[in-house]
Image (cartoon, rainbow, N blue to C red):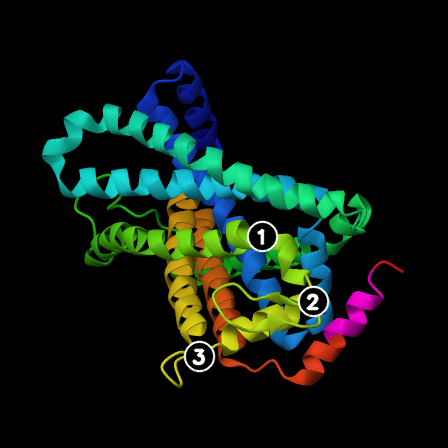
Amino acid sequence: MTSLVLTMTELLRYRGAIGQWSWMLHRLSGLGVVLFLTLHVIDTSWAVFYPDLYVHAIAAYQSPLFTIGEFALVAAVVYHALNGIRVAVIDNRPRLWKYQQRAAYIVLGLTVLILIPTFILMFGHVLNFYGSGAPTLSLIEVLTAQAPFVAGFAVAIIAAILFSLVFGLIAGNRKDVSVGKGTGSRLERFWWSFMRVSGVLIVPLVFGHLAMVHLIQGVFDITAANFTVVGTDLVNQTGTAVEFVAQRWNYQIFGAVAIWRLYDIALLSLAVIHGFNGLRYVLTDYTMSSPVLRRASIYLCVIGAVILLVLGAGALLGTIDQSAIEIATHAAENLHR
């Protein structure tokens, strides 16, 4: 907590110096993306395991609250991606460090230039949906639907703390004496490199995903009947989100290559590991003085990453059959009754 307070006071003391603000924005945008990634992977897995729940999840995404959140998410992704490239380039070319301030301003400028047309396209989808008079969930219904996620986060946090306490009782609570000595372990050097390499590899994958499901069609078109599913020549006949996912994942090229399953597997693995390792950096930065909380932070990130990878992989390797689409159709019909 002391470290967090110090971070905020130092941020204010710098009075907006671009280096400090870039560092803070990178962390905040990363945390926002990890939060959404967690929700998105879990609820997308429901398309396979719980089709009726996926219908309700997409209905929540099509509410005014999540519509605002969608704009914030896209802004966070664009800034975090561009600034991550800046960090990767400068870290691997130290001689460019003298240009870091200029590069930070360039990142902000590019972010704005990308977001202006992006938001215009997204706003067009928003106007079409809300202008059509389509029913939406109430704010209470949307917030209530998030209760299981809040409970799950709480359980994961409690489990991480308990694991840390048990480990402390067995091995003793010792501070990491190597912290601050600049030596670093081989494993940490690996993660340092991984974050930069994976960050660059993720950019085309995540930008492609955003373009397909936020710009070309948009979140609202996922439940539009008789629409061609983006990236395929298949039609979402029932207009359910479950059939949208099924058609997308079942689309094949070159005879038997499920191209979008492979795409999403690559995006899932890179984004989850990159995101939760980044979360580990943030949490451990603010728990340096407490061995228990520091270990708990690491355990929490491991638990989160493993759960998302297992759920996501299970869904991507699973099958959405006709019965699942029928369940989703029935749930959609009864959604606003």
Marks 1 and 3, Cα distance to the nearest angstrom? Answer: 22 Å
Q: Secondary structure at mark 2?
A: loop
- Residue shown at the point (36%, 81%) measured from the top left: 254
Residue ID at (43%, 64%) = 268
| Coordinates of residue 111 in the picture (x, y in percent) | 39, 34
Ranked by sequence position, the earlier of labels 1 and 3 is: 1
Q: How far apart are the alpha carbons under marks 2 and 3?
A: 21 Å
Mark 2 vs mark 3: which is more N-terminal? Answer: 2
Q: Amino acid at mark 3?
A: Gln
Asked whether the beta carbons under mark 1 and mark 2 sit within 8 Å of each other, the answer is: no
Q: How crowded is the residue under tag 2: few (<14 C-alpha within 10 Å), some, or many (20+)?
A: many
Q: Residue furthest left?
A: 95
Give me the disc on residue 218.
1
Left or right: 115 in relation to 87: right
Q: Mark 1 vs mark 2: which is more N-terminal? A: 1
Residue 327 visible within the image: yes
Kindly identify the amino acid type of the residue bearing the numbered disc 1.
Gly
- Dot 3 falls on a residue whose secondary structure is loop
Q: Which residue is mark 2?
A: 239
Whether residue 199 is situated above or below residue 236 in the rendered picture: above
- Image: magenta residue range: 328-335
Label 2 is placed on what type of residue?
Answer: Gly
Please tell me how crowded label 1 is: few (under 14), some (14-19), or many (20+) other residues with Cα within 10 Å.
Answer: some
**Residue assigned mark 3:** 252
Is 329 inside the magenta-drawn segment? yes
Answer yes or no: is residue 154 visible. no
Residue 199 image offset from top left, x and y in percent = 31, 51
